[in-house]
Amino acid sequence: MNVREHPASQAPGRAGVRVRVATQLPTWPIGVMFAGLPLWWASGLLDVVTIPFALLMAWLLTRAHGVRVPRGFGWWLLYCAWALASVVMLDRAVGVVLFGYRWLLCVAAGVIFAYVFNARATLTSRYLSGTLTLWFLYVALGGCLGLLAPTGSLRTPLHHLLPAAARGNELVGQMTIRPFAQYNPGGFLEVSPRPTAPFLYTNNWGSVYSLLAPFVVVYLLHTWRTRRGAAVAVLLVASTIPAFLTLNRGMFVSLGIAVAYLVGRAVLARNLRIVAVVALAATLGVVLFNLLPISERLGMRLNEDAQGTSNTTRISLYEQSLSAVASSPLLGHATPIPPANPLEPSVGTQGQLWMLLVSHGPVAAFAWITFFLAMYARGRRRGDPIGVAACTTLLVGTVQLLFYGMLPYGLPLLMIAAAVAARGPELPTTEGDLP
């Protein structure tokens, strides 16, 4: 199969260069990977599903001609190579499995980036934003499930098929038993349930929610004045109920950054539709914040943090992370390391930045951050809705590195945003797409 000149590519692009697009790359690998979330969640494969789909995308890319990657992708290759080299720092064979799992997720994310970047003729703004809006719907439904059945959990078929020795592994156990919420009704402190489904932790839920929100706004613009648009608007408003009740402070910060950036870019571009949508969503959000018992629950959570010395523990882990970097500055320790206090989480698990520094060292962390900043730089001047949304997600994802982990759920979303930002303005390939 050959790459053919797309009709829109007859117009010169930047610096008069004609655009070639790999139109033979199908949409369904991305569509099935995201649309199939309920199946992957129920089967216990959600945390690893990007790896087999990345293998499929890599095979499709090898069959295409003219596949290319943008300048700056070398930083991601450097990160993957440097992270792989840090495997020599492992002193226990059991750590190889965890290391290999995380490394394969990062390699798979790179393949997803290359696929979306090269499939610009088929993975249009409308298709990508619609697919990610469907994921947003699943996230919102999972949040509602966590509120309605906070003590519930799903024991996946994979849990019953695996031997007891495998189920005893912490990583495997997390994949195969999926809680609906973080909630301990028998705990000393009366803490309200915080939704997690379809993910493992409330922080995962809040991270994905805020990374997806800009793309939902884009899809709302695509479907404006239609029944589907009305449904998306209702979804966006209704999703704020489980979002607020997560009491996720990192998500609140992320959404604040996203709203400020979206509005600022829309004002500069004189795009009043985006300003109107964001303003309406923000107004309804304020109303719901005051109607729901959020202030009371947030106060209870802050009280829980104060009594449980949560903030003190986090600061201690940050200090231990810096000490771990100093003890192995070149290649890191390959994986997060045990803390000084065995009751605390592992050192290097309080945010993706800290995991990178502890596991692979400053060079790997620099390569990771530089890659996403380079892709942001390629798209920062775009004024089309999908370009602005992609840059918004990249900005939010960069800030989240300080307090959220990006594996395995957030990184694929960041890669899609990076590919969209890097591949330039939308080609008018499908009727109904924004110009």
Image (cartoon, rainbow, N blue to C red):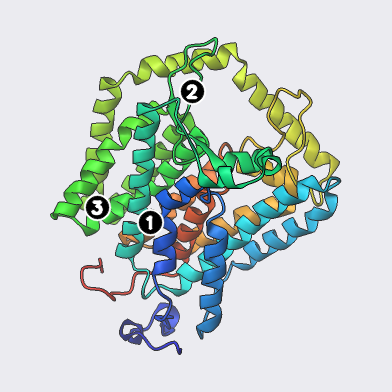
> Which disc is residue 250 wearing?
none
Q: Residue at x 65, y 37 (%)?
A: 349
> Which disc is residue 35 wearing?
1
The tag earlier along the polypeptide, 2 or 3, is 2
Under tag 1, what secondary structure?
Answer: helix
The quadrant the C terminus occupies is bottom left
Give coordinates of residue 88: x percent, y percent.
84, 54
The amino acid type, in three-letter code, at marker 1 is: Ala
Q: Residue at x 51, y 48 (%)?
A: 409
Q: Are marks 1 and 3 in contact (CB under 8 Å)?
A: no
Give coordinates of residue 58: x percent, y percent.
56, 72
Q: CA distance from mark 1 to mark 2?
A: 28 Å
Task: From the viewer's perspective, tell me whether residue 111 is left or right of residue 231.
Answer: right
Q: Return the residue at label 3.
A: 220
The tag earlier along the polypeptide, 1 or 3, is 1
Q: CA distance from mark 1 to mark 3?
A: 18 Å
Q: Are marks 2 and 3 in contact (CB under 8 Å)?
A: no
Instruction: Tell me the quarter of the picture where residue 420 sits.
Output: bottom left
Q: Return the residue at label 2.
A: 183
